[in-house]
Every structure is written in C-alpha cells, then in structure tokens.
Image (cartoon, rainbow, N blue to C red):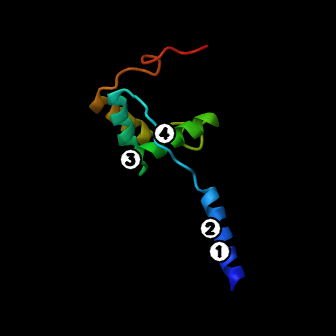
Amino acid sequence: MANTRHGSAASKARAQADKPARILVGVRLEARLVKVMKGLAALNDLTLGELVEEVFLRAMEGESAFADRRGKLAPDMKRAISGLRTVYGVSYSSGALLPRRK
C-alpha cells in the first residue's frame, strides 16, 4: 500500500513540474491598446495573460497568433481587430509607440 501512495506522490510531483509557473509582472502599456487586447482575449476565450503568452510564443516561432493555417489573418479576425481598434481609438501603427531597434 505504501507503493501506491509513493507512486501517487511521484505522479503529483511530475504533474506539478509540467504545469507552467506563472508570476505577476508590472508592465505599463498604452491604455487604448490594452482595451483592444482585452477585447481580442475575450473573443478568443482567453485571459489577457494567456493572450500575451500566445502572441509572444507564436512570434518566437515566426508565426502570428491570429493567422490561419496559411499564415493569413482570417477575414472575421480582421473585422474584429479593425472594429476594436476603431472603438478604442487605436489608429497608430506598431512603430508609433517605440522606434524600431537595429
């Protein structure tokens, strides 16, 4: 019976090691952009943190988090993003907030 318990504890330890360890971070972001991000997260049934993780992990793989299998933004996703940008007044592009680094 002790082996069953020990095996159970080992299984729990393995499962715990496989879970992502998340931490709180202090990040300042442009207020209107955060509203668009929250809207996109909600549309994709994600938390804001999950959205940020997804976007960054995909970017590291050279992909877009919102692209289809061909790497194109689906028309419905384009409309959703465009609508959120309009509603929250995000008319600037990626280079407007910070200059590109060489």
Q: Secondary structure at mark 3?
A: helix
Marks 2 and 1, how far apart at CA: 6 Å
Could you tell which of marks 4 and 2 lies nearer the N-terminus? 2
Is 44 drawn above or below residue 2 in the view shown?
A: above
Kindly report the distance in space between the C-alpha atoms of the residues bearing marks 3 and 4: 14 Å
Closest to the observer, 86 or 29: 29
Q: Is residue 10 visible?
A: yes
Mark 2 in CB contact with mark 1 (< 8 angstroms): yes
Residue 16 coordinates in the image, percent (x, y): 60, 60
Query: Which mark's residue is nearer the viewer, 4 or 2?
Result: 2
In which quadrant of the rendered image does the C terminus lie? top right
Q: Residues within 10 Å of mark 2 (few under 14, many from 20)?
A: few
The residue labelled by disc 3 is 43
In this rendering, does residue 67 appear at all? no
Pick whichever, 68 or 8, lies toward us: 8
Residue 99: give x, y in percent of width and height.
50, 14
What residue appears at the point 39 percent right and 28 percent down from the top-left corner?
29
92 lies above or below 53: above
The residue tagged 2 is 12
CA gap, disc 1 and disc 4: 34 Å
* Residue closest to the eye, 27 or 1: 1
